[in-house]
Image (cartoon, rainbow, N blue to C red):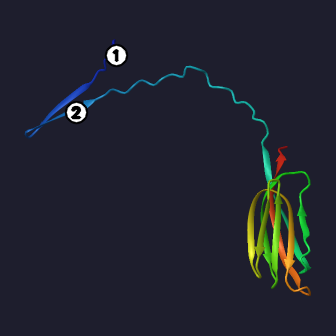
């Protein structure tokens, strides 16, 4: 660079038959030197990690429309995925309580239903059908809880 901010340009002119080719090259810019010295690395606070947890169980109750609680949470907000499977001929009514509302879903015979729940509090199942029949099935609740790093 010259004084006043004017660049030095190199010009190369070649004649090829009746066409004039002009190539202009710009000189490389000098590398900038770092103004500040590199910063020292600082320690970050320990991150909280989450560990996956599964709660599995068997649903086994009479089909007499009596609600049975299969899972409850004591004082902790857990976001979870609940998977409920009905293995019998009767219908199951699943009630998932959250801290804001209740989710009610009918599960027909031989069906499986999954729920993603932001904050589960309890899982209740009501079987309806013939009074002598038994309702059978499975449930799995997958959630993550926070752990402190060592």
Kindly indicate the quadrant of the structure image that contains residue 88: bottom right
Residue beneath the point at 90% across and 61% down: 72
Residue 69 located left or right of residue 87 = right
At label 1, counting other C-alpha atoms closer than 10 Å, the crowd grade (few under 14, some 14-19, many 20 or more) is: few
At label 2, counting other C-alpha atoms closer than 10 Å, the crowd grade (few under 14, some 14-19, many 20 or more) is: few
Residue 111 located left or right of residue 31 = right
Q: Which comes sooner in the sequence, label 1 or label 2?
A: 1
Please say if 76 is above or below 47. Answer: below
Numbered circle sitting on residue 23: 2
Viewer-proximal residue among 4 and 69 = 69
Viewer-proximal residue among 46 and 93 = 93
For discs 1 and 2, the disc positioned in front in the rendered view: 1
Position of the C terminus, as image quadrant, is top right
> How far across and how far down the image is residue 135, in percent?
87, 81
Residue beneath the point at 28% across and 30% down: 25
Viewer-proximal residue among 69 and 28 = 69
Position of the N terminus, as image quadrant, is top left
Residue beneath the point at 84% across and 77% down: 137
> How far across and how far down the image is residue 127, in percent?
86, 77
Please say if 147 is above or below 27. Answer: below
Q: Tell which residue pokes out farthest to the top in this image.
A: 3
Residue beneath the point at 22% across and 33% down: 23
Please say if 87 is above or below 81. Answer: below
Q: Disc 1 versus disc 2: distance between alpha carbons?
A: 22 Å
- Say which residue label 1 marks: 5
Residue 10 located left or right of residue 147 = left
Mark 2 lies on a secondary structure that is strand
> How far across and how far down the image is residue 71, in percent?
89, 64
């Amino acid at each position: 660079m010259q004084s006043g901010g004017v660049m030095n340009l190199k010009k190369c002119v070649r004649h090829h038959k009746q066409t004039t080719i002009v190539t202009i090259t710009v000189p490389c810019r000098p590398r900038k030197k770092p103004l500040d010295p590199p910063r020292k690395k600082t320690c970050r606070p320990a991150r909280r990690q989450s560990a996956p947890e599964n709660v599995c169980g068997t649903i086994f109750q009479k089909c007499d429309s009596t609600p049975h609680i299969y899972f409850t949470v004591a004082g902790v907000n857990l976001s979870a995925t609940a998977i409920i499977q009905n293995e019998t001929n009767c219908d199951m009514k699943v009630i998932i309580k959250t801290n804001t509302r209740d989710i009610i879903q009918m599960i027909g015979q031989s069906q499986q239903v999954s729920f993603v729940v932001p904050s589960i509090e309890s899982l209740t199942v009501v079987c309806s059908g013939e009074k002598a029949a038994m309702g059978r099935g499975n449930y799995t609740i997958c959630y993550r809880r926070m752990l402190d790093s060592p």
